[in-house]
Every structure is written in structure tokens, then in C-alpha cells.
Amino acid sequence: MGFIETKNWIVDKEREIVPQIEEAAMWIRENEVVAFPTETVYGLGANAYSEEAVAKIFQAKGRPSDNPLIVHIASVVQLERLVDEIPLHAKILIDAFWPGPLTLVLNKGEGIAENVTAGLSTVAVRMPDHPVALAIISEADLPIAAPSANVSGKPSPTLAAHVLSDLNGKIAGIVDGGPTGVGLESTVLDCTTEVPMILRPGGVTREQLEKVIGNVVVDPALEDDGQAPKSPGVKYKHYAPQAKLFLVDGTAAFLQEQVENAKAAGKKVGVLTTIEGVPNYQADVVLPSGTATDLATVAQHLYEVLRKFDEYDLDVIYSETFSEEAVGKAIMNRLTKAAGGDVIKEQL
Ligand code: TXA
Ligand code: MG
């Protein structure tokens, strides 16, 4: 694929439709791919009705073609065309959580490009809670298929600079609306079964969902490596920094012991902690992701920190673990994947 000049449109997310957004929307209507901010991470968008446009997403990201995309909409009217029917529990969830970081998997309708859903009979849809994303979708007047705007396997982008570092020269443009909010991707919920099932934990927690619709189950494959996950994307190695990452389940002293051992073996070592944890470690690089007193801030900065480690040419990174309460579930899901499942547990 040849180099294309990637346009960079900077927008103020508090302002109404601006010429930059009109231009970005025009490129999407022309079946080109454009990155834009959402409240979770940056997405890489294309016309969900065009096989040709959607193919450009897979090519730019190097994404396996069996991994389906999320379709982004700005109104419930758009949803009616995309899906076969909207079951009652989905309607209730839409009222409660859209726009927001909740993706619903529903039986698909007609018209949507086959490669968006990787040939599945279902389609994943969400309405992002970000004025720039909503303005682009409305202005393009199309449902927009958009995965996270990173090269496949890398942490998702929470800053426009992350998108550029991965995709400059490979996409038509990027709308820079500043840092995203949640920092981790949306929760993916399969609504095609009687009891909805979480396929990927994310910005909306199981507790929040259950408050609104009662019983929700979690794909057993998320807890057990032996099983095939229902969400194709979940099986791929993801979010990983260049250095080998280990999660350390234990005290700060035990984590520091791992650091000492690695240093003794001549390795360059990083530590991932929170602001409060920084003084506990002596390593080549110690980076905090948010504050221990608020897991939402850990989520917000996690991908930025994972990418930051790549600047230091480290051999190994040891990360603290986090409570799996609320958004902690999504944090631990991403960290466990980034570590390829390698957890060092302190024997007490
Ligand atoms: O927050 C987000 O969800 C971000 C922003 C850009 O909206 N998007 C995102 O997209 O994370 P992506 O492509 O990186 O992740 C989509 C996930 C994958 O795990 C994929 O397998 C799953 O959703 N998915 C998509 N369609 C599906 C379907 N029909 N059935 C099951 N899983 C599906
Ligand atoms: Mg992704």
C-alpha cells in the first residue's frame, strides 16, 4: 500500500459542527477512512454500507478479517435499519446507557457490508458519548464502522498522537479532539440470548447493567483460557508493550524483589503502578497510571502508560494488579491480555 497524506483536523469538542468535521464526514462519504475521538478510545471509521471502505480499515490496521467491527450510530433511527429486531432488554439498555460505552450485539438486518460483521449473522452497534463522534456520524449521515484506531495488537489510542504514530500515511485523516475520557473500550454485550452475556468487559460494568435489566452473565471464556470466546476479537493478543509484561499479585516488597532479580540478571526493568505506589519501587522506569483511590483514573491512563514504556527500550515490566470491582474488571482484563496471562503470585 502506498503512502497517503494523512490530514490532521484539530477540533474543539465544545464547539458545534465546524468545517473540519464537515470535511472529515465528506471523506467518509467518499469511502475513505478517518480516525476520530470517542469517549472510550479513538476509532478508525468508514462507511458501514461500503465493502470497499470497510476493507481499508482492515488493511490500515493489519486486522485479521475474522474479527468483526463495531458500527457507530448517532440516532436510534439508524439502528432500526441495521438490525433485524430490537429485543426488549436491549431497548431498556439503550434508554439507560446510550450514548455511552456499551456495545450491543444484535441480529443483523439488510444492507450492511459483509466484512463489517466478518460474515456473522449478528452486528455490534453503539452510540458513542462524544460530541465530535456524534457530529461526524450525523454529518456523514451514515452508520460508521469503527474499530479502535491502533495497529492490530497495540494498545488502543487515547490521544491523537497515538493514532498518528500507528497510522500516519495509511489513512485519509484524523480528527484530533483531545484525549478520550474512559480510556478503555466499550463493554460488548450479546443481546441475542435470553440472558444477555458480556463478551468484553468495559466502560459500563456488570453491576450497572444488572441494576437495569436484572441477570447478566459473563462469557465463561473470559475467565477460562481453555474455552473459545464468543467475541472473535477477544482471542487475539492485544495491548502489549514491546517489553515482556508480568502482573505481580502481592505486596510492593514482593514486586520490588522481582525487579531486583531482573536487574541482577542484567535486564532493564520498568514498573507499572499508581501515583501512590511510585515511592515503593527502584527500577529503571517507574510509571503511574492514575491514582489508587479512583480506578476510573487508572483506566483513563492505562494505554497511554503501556505505550510510554515503549520509549525506554526495556526488557521487562512488572505491573501491580488491581481490584476487579467495577471498572477494575476491564482494567484487569486488558492487563492480563497485555501480559499474555503471566501472573507472578506471592505465596503468603
Ligand atoms: O469503545 C469501543 O468499543 C471502541 C470505540 C472506537 O468505539 N471500539 C473498539 O472496537 O474497541 P474494536 O474493533 O477494537 O473491538 C470490537 C470488539 C472486538 O472484540 C470484536 O470481536 C467484537 O467487538 N465484536 C464486533 N462485532 C461482534 C459480533 N457481531 N459478535 C461478537 N463480537 C463482536
Ligand atoms: Mg481494538
Image (cartoon, grey):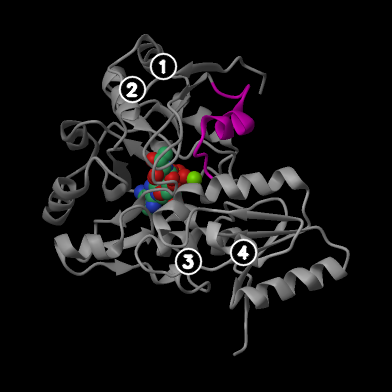
Q: Where is residue 281 in the image (x, y as percent from the top left)?
A: 68, 65
* Mark number, residue 24: 1
Q: Mark 3 points at which residue?
A: 228
Give the side of residue 177 with respect to residue 7, left or right.
left
* Mark number, residue 288: none
Q: In this orientation, does residue 250 appear?
A: yes
Labels 3, 4: front one: 4
Quarter of the image for residue 296 reads bottom left
> Is the residue at mark 4 in contact range of ligand 2, meaning its CB lies under 8 Å from it?
no
Inter-mark Cα distance, 3 to 4? 27 Å
Density class for disc 4 (Cα within 10 Å; few <14, some 14-19, many ≥20) is many
Q: Given the image, on which type of amino acid does mark 2 rest?
A: Ile
N-terminal-most mark, 3 or 2: 2
Labels 4, 1: front one: 4
Marks 1/2 in contact by CB < 8 Å: the verdict is yes
N-terminal-most mark, 4 or 1: 1
Density class for disc 3 (Cα within 10 Å; few <14, some 14-19, many ≥20) is some
Q: Where is residue 292 in the image (x, y as percent from the top left)?
A: 47, 62
N-terminal-most mark, 3 or 1: 1
